[in-house]
Image (cartoon, rainbow, N blue to C red):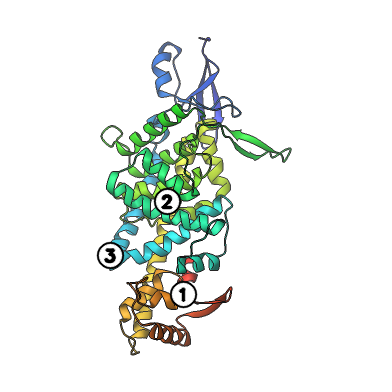
């Protein structure tokens, strides 16, 4: 063992951090460390990544020292986030059919989360594929549809069996349409050097499969074992997300898998009843901050800045989602009042149909063996859609030679 060296460094958002150099690794603490108590203090301090170019098999297990997340500013921001989430849950639970909101909002979450990874498609292309349940083999739209499917499948998995490694692997497989699992080879994350503008390695996650599984087991235990780890569920989600991305257990799709886990953890802990927190929209708008604070956890042990960033994301997103749901509900009531002046049959069910997804088709409304939940005959469906277009509730659009009926108010709300 080398002779310990004690000193201080400055970190963003933290006035002074004490560090201890021991066996070529930095160990950080927010308070002075006595050399005489070194064995005790090593357990409490957070080890940071000593070499970004080598696999960090020494990634510390969870949880980090309480001083990194039990601070007055974090607790104050946590209260704000929990209030926002409680309001969102109350509003969602009060809806007669919350499934309508879940369907539309998760579609946007899937699109935004994929955009963070530079997987893009147009709204019209996405809505077209979703409205017709078209089976496409590859491409960005396929990946986004897979992501949305993984949200719903994961939601059901967690209700049935709780969080475990098999669930996490299945989420990854659905997102990426792959059959493999936890990786067995080294990977690394790259970024752009601000000086040379060259792409360089910025972080190398653990590489040994046994170590990866050990880290995942610890992460799952931290999330699920509330008797052992008495930490607020929102903080568990935030700390767990940083740890999952540091582990990077798969060859690809780690970001999207991790972001699905975020909202599923909140539903599993009953912070929300349904997976409706549209968090990826905020992350996509602040992508540079997201990656900066995420990287700074392993690079500088700066948990506080990461947690503060994510708590703001949760609070802001909860209120944005609250407003979206309120706007959609108000638009549906307005549509119901309009239909009340017509002779349309099954008006309530019709409104739910055209608000379940942004694009509607004749097939979507027509009852058949393939669509037992349809409402009308094909002729009636066609006539009703034409009438809804005539009164301005829908807009007829032509994409690739096919006709779709676009709910303009709904798409405008989703894009806000």
In the rendered structure, which disc, 1 or 2, sits on the residue that comes first in sequence? 2
Q: At which x and y percent is residue 306?
A: 48, 40
> What's the residue at 61%, 35% (across, down)?
202
Crowdedness of circle 2 by 10 Å Cα count: few (<14), some, many (20+)?
many
Distance of label 1 from label 3 (alpha carbons): 22 Å
> Residue beneath label 3, please?
94
Q: At which x and y percent is residue 184?
A: 50, 32
In the rendered structure, which disc, 3 or 2, sits on the residue that comes first in sequence? 3
Residue 416 is at least partly visible in this image: no
Q: Which mark is residue 409?
A: 1
Tell me: residue 379, above or below residue 330: below
* Image-quadrant location for residue 339: bottom left
Distance of label 3 from label 2 (alpha carbons): 21 Å
Q: Secondary structure at mark 1?
A: helix
Q: Secondary structure at mark 3?
A: helix
* Image-quadrant location for residue 87: bottom left
Q: Which mark is residue 95?
A: none
Distance of label 1 from label 2 (alpha carbons): 26 Å
Q: How many marks?
A: 3
Q: Which mark is residue 314?
A: 2
Name the residue nearer the viewer: 282 or 96.
Answer: 96
> What's the residue at 74%, 38% (across, down)?
196
Tell me: residue 348, above or below residue 144: below
Q: Are marks 3 and 2 in contact (CB under 8 Å)?
A: no
């Amino acid at each position: 063992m080398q002779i310990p060296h004690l000193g201080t460094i400055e970190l963003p958002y933290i006035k002074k951090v004490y560090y201890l150099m021991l066996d070529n690794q930095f160990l950080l603490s927010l308070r002075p460390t006595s050399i005489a108590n070194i064995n005790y203090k090593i357990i409490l301090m957070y080890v940071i990544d000593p070499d970004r170019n080598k696999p960090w098999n020494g990634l510390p297990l969870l949880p980090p020292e309480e001083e990194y997340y039990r601070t007055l500013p974090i607790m104050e921001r946590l209260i704000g986030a929990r209030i926002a989430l409680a309001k969102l849950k109350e509003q969602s639970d009060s809806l007669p059919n919350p499934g309508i909101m879940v369907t539309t909002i998760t579609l946007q979450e899937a699109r935004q989360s994929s955009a963070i990874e530079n997987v893009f498609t147009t709204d019209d292309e996405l809505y077209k594929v979703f409205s017709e349940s078209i089976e496409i083999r590859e491409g960005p739209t396929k990946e986004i549809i897979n992501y949305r499917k993984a949200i719903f499948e994961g939601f059901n998995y967690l209700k049935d069996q709780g969080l475990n490694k098999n669930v996490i692997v299945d989420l990854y497989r659905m997102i990426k349409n792959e059959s493999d699992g936890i990786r067995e080879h080294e990977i690394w994350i790259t970024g752009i050097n601000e000086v040379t503008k060259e792409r360089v390695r910025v972080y190398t996650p653990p590489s040994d499969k046994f170590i990866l599984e050990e880290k995942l087991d610890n992460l799952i235990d931290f999330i699920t074992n509330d008797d052992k780890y008495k930490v607020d569920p929102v903080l568990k989600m935030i700390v767990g997300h940083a740890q999952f991305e540091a582990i990077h257990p798969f060859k690809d799709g780690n970001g999207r898998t991790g972001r699905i886990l975020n909202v599923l953890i909140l539903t599993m802990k009953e912070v929300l009843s349904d997976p409706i927190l549209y968090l990826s929209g905020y992350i996509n708008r602040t992508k540079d901050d997201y990656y900066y604070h995420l990287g700074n956890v392993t690079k500088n042990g700066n948990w506080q800045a990461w947690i503060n960033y994510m708590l703001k994301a949760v609070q802001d997103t909860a209120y944005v989602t609250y407003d979206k749901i309120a706007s959609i509900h108000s638009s549906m009531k307005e549509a119901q009042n309009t239909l009340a002046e017509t002779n349309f049959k099954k008006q309530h069910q019709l409104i739910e149909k055209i608000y379940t997804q942004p694009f509607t088709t004749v097939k979507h409304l027509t009852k058949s063996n393939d669509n037992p939940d349809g409402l009308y005959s094909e002729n009636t469906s066609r006539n009703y859609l034409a009438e809804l277009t005539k009164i301005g509730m829908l807009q007829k659009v032509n994409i690739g030679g096919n006709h779709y009926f676009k709910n303009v108010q709904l798409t405008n709300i989703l894009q806000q």
